[in-house]
Amino acid sequence: MAELPEGSVVFGVFNETSDTESRVALTPDIVTRLKKSGVTCLIETRAGEMAGYTDADYAGAGAEIAEPARIVAEADALGFVDRPSPALVEQLKPGTWIIGMLGSFTDADYVASLERRGLVAVAIERLPRQLSSAQSMDEMTSQNSVMGYKAALVAANAYGSFLPMMTTAAGTIRPAKVLILGAGIAGLQAIGTARRLGGVVTAYDVRPASRGEVESLGAKFLDLGLDFSAGQGEGGYARALTPEEQAAQQAAVDEKAAGFDIVITTAKVPGRKPPVLLTRAGVDGLHRGAVVVDCAASDLGGNVEGSIVGEQVTDGGVKLIGAPYLASEVPTTASNLLARNVADILVHFVHDGRLAADMDQELDRAMVVAGAPAGQPSAETGK
Ligand code: NAD
């Protein structure tokens, strides 16, 4: 076993391969990049396999391939696609930094368990995305954009007809009509991909600013005749609608969706249960053979009433696909982007060969959810 260089921060990554996860939080090119910032990498055997990277690729880039026990013992910081399991949390040594999607908006008990264990927890979901210095760390943007692209491909694959218009000797095939609900990062990628496949695309978002973005991609904006601009959420994000607004929106979406062949939903509100946009009645109003892909599907429900993670066919013959894991289905690109995001977050906290959070900085204050007490002007933690 080689000695790790003196005075460097040791960054560890585990193999997170599960039934639904093919991504990895470190890629070989990022190993090389991190070395220049004084960070040495330890990576578990076969961690990059599903994303297309072998142990030899990592070793060639300068990482050490290690067993989990060594990573636990030697890493100063750990990077995750998701977050460490409760069992792993209990094994980690106090003072270890963890960087991941920690679910801190919805799972206070989990964050409390990290605090109890003495870990320094950096929650990627809390990245202040509006800061220009945070752009390269924005995993929500990078992964949502992969997800939106794949959502259009999954929908096209599940649909029993062509997407493009085609004139053949046997007659003309009309193009598929595609409706995208939620035109943020994922929705805009879904629009672009569905259009490139030849679909005729219409999109809707609750944010008034999205109309111009939708139209600039050559799609039509769906006008529901409702105005939710009052009380727009912080930083240009959608706010949660009131129950009355939501009911009005659902009725309007249900009615308008009836003419579409494919519906892709990507609407979320940060840190909350996704809003239901298409109700059961809306799904029943779609024709036999129509396809719905709900990217917001989760255990708490998604944008489509009755959607579950996985695939089902309704009594009316509509294919309903609950697909929150689509970024993982483009594992190489998704990992390349995600690894860059995680590495840039890590490097942000490396100062003179040490890990430290400066609670006077907006980014640090927002993201460090455990291990650096609030109200303390400058917290230095780790080694
Ligand atoms: P997201 O994944 O949280 O939401 C997806 C989309 O769903 C959003 O466009 C949102 O407006 C929409 N939505 C929420 N509730 C809805 C409802 N009831 N009906 C219809 N649509 C609804 O967000 P995201 O896609 O990651 O980002 C959203 C927007 O934030 C982006 O389009 C971008 O303009 C902005 N953004 C800004 C920065 C920055 O300032 N640097 C960074 C990232 C994103």
Image: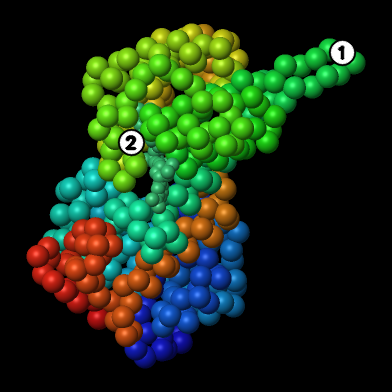
Name the spot of residue 113 as percent of width and height, x first. 17, 56
- Which quarter of the image is occupied by the C terminus? bottom left
Of 245 and 31, nearer the camera is 245
Of 317 and 45, nearer the camera is 317
Indicate the quadrant of ligand 1 in the picture.
Answer: top left
Q: Is residue 177 visible?
A: yes
Task: Using a 10 Å C-alpha cutoff, classify the residue at mark 1 as few (fewer than 14 neighbours), some (14 to 19) or many (20 or more).
Answer: few
Give the residue at x 84% y 12%.
171
Mark 1: is the Cβ under 8 angstroms from ligand 1? no
In this view, the residue farthest toward the bottom is: 6
Q: Is residue 73 visible?
A: no
User: Which colouring convention does the figure follow?
Assistant: rainbow
Give amino acid for label 1: Ala
**Residue 238: mark:** 2
Name the spot of residue 47 as percent of width and height, x first. 49, 62
Give the residue at x 50% y 75%.
33
Mark 2: is the Cβ under 8 angstroms from ligand 1? yes
In this view, the residue farthest toward the left is: 375
Give amino acid for label 2: Ala
Give the residue at x 56% y 77%.
61
Q: Separation of disc 2 and disc 1 at Cα?
A: 47 Å
The image quadrant of residue 374 is bottom left
Question: Which element type, helix, strand or loop, lies under badge 1?
Answer: loop
Where is 65 relative to 329, above or below? below
Provide the residue designation for mark 1: 170
